[in-house]
Image: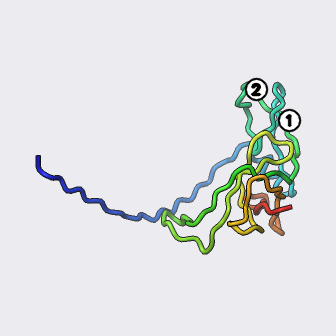
Amino acid sequence: MADIKETFFNTVAPLDFGYNYRVGSYLQRYIDALKEKKIVGAKCPQCGSVVVPPRKYCGSCNEVREEFVELLTEGTLENFTIGHVTIDKGQVNKAESPYILGLIKLGGADNLLLGKVEGVPAGDVKTGMKLKAAWRDQTEGDYSDLDHFEPV
């Protein structure tokens, strides 16, 4: 059998897509609360679990979650990753500096919320750290109103 030479090539196709879609009533409640510098979750009437961002159906018992509860804006860093690249319109670029994405367990929630972590050097971040929400100065009713989490 003849040797087969395999050739590989890399190509970058910069993508730029704009989307307009309705987030639904549950995420709208979450976003509206962010504008007020609050974080809300949805509570299951059967098992009592609270999820953030709110979801309509409980993953454990399949009950409709109708109660919205305000959560603490402080929590514990349960896990994290340190990023070294960014993606802009399909193009992978080296980040200006390492950044931290964390999974935070807020007081009153049963699941983890993903968020940027700032105010601590990437080399010093540790699971178990106590963090608090940090808000944009001017909130506008957008996901970015909750800017990041930082050490308490």
Residue type, mark 1 in image:
Glu
Residue in view at x 76 percent, y 26 percent: 63
37 relative to 56, above or below: below
Q: Residues within 10 Å of mark 2 (few under 14, many from 20)?
A: some
Q: Between 104 and 92, which is closer to the camera in this rendering?
A: 104
Label 1, on which residue? 67
Q: Is residue 96 left or right of residue 73?
A: left
Question: Picture coordinates of residue 101 (x, y %)?
Answer: 67, 58
44 relative to 106, above or below: above
Residue type, mark 2 in image:
Glu
* Element on which disc 2 rests: loop
Label 2, on which residue? 63
* Element on which disc 1 rests: strand
Picture quadrant of residue 142: bottom right
Residue closest to the far bottom: 96
Distance of label 1 from label 2 (alpha carbons): 12 Å
Question: Picture coordinates of residue 152 (x, y %)?
Answer: 86, 61
